[in-house]
Amino acid sequence: MLKKSDELKNTIVEQLRKTPIIQIACEKLNISRMSFYRWKNEDNEFAKKVDEALLDGQLLVNDLAESQLISAVKDRNMSAIMSWLKHHHPAYRTRVQIEGTINTIQEMSDEQKELVRKALTLAKLNLEDYESRE
C-alpha cells in the first residue's frame, strides 16, 4: 500500500509532465514548494522522475509553441515568419562580427595558442585570419 506522500509524489510527477512549472504543479495539488523540494532532496528516485517529467513537459510545451508558430506563419504573420526563418534558415540567422587585434607582450605558449584557436572556432571566426597574424 502506498503512503499518501508517495501518491502525491506520483501525482506531482504526472502534473509536471503536463505543465512543467513546479509552482503551478504544487498549487494544483495543494503541496507546499518546501515539501516538494524536501522530497526531491531526500528521495533520489523521486528527483530523477521529476527531472524526466520536467523535460517531457518542456518538450510538450515546445511542440505546442512550434505548432502555434506554424499556424501564425500560415496566417502570414510577419513576426512569426521572421522568427521561424531566424531559427531554421542559415541566411536569416543573427550574425555578430568581431574585429580586433591581439597584442601580446610575450610569445604565447603552444597551449595558449591552442586555447585561442578553440575560442575562435567556437566563435566561428576565420582561423586563417588569426594564423596569418602569428
Image (cartoon, rainbow, N blue to C red):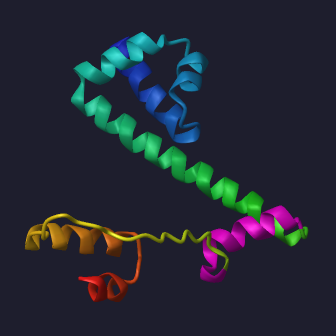
Residue sitting nearer the eye, 4 or 29: 29
Residue sitting nearer the eye, 7 or 50: 50
Quadrant (top left, top right, bottom left, bottom right) of the C terminus = bottom left
State whether residue 89 appears in this view: yes
Q: Position of residue 32 (x, y in %)?
A: 48, 10
Residue 52 lies in quadrant: top left
Identify the residue at the far front of this view: 105
State whether residue 1 appears in this view: no
In this rendering, the count of numbered labels is: 0
Is 85 drawn above or below residue 35 in the view shown?
below
Is residue 27 in the magenta section?
A: no
Q: Residue at x 47, y 27 (%)?
A: 11
Quadrant (top left, top right, bottom left, bottom right) of the N terminus = top left
Q: Residue at x 79, y 63 (%)?
A: 80
Q: Position of residue 132 (x, y in %)?
A: 29, 89
Please provide the residue range marked out in magenta: 77-91
Q: Position of residue 38 (x, y in %)?
A: 32, 15
Position of 77 with respect to 27 (left or right) is right
Is 20 drawn above or below residue 61 in the view shown?
above
Is residue 86 in the magenta section?
A: yes
Q: Residue at x 29, y 67 (%)?
A: 103
Residue 5 lies in quadrant: top left
Residue sitting nearer the eye, 23 or 98: 98
Is 20 drawn above or below residue 105 in the view shown?
above
Position of 134 with respect to 125 (left or right) is left
Q: Position of residue 108 (x, y in %)?
A: 13, 69
Q: Residue at x 39, y 23 (%)?
A: 9
Q: Main secondary structure of the magenta part?
A: helix
Residue sitting nearer the eye, 82 or 76: 82
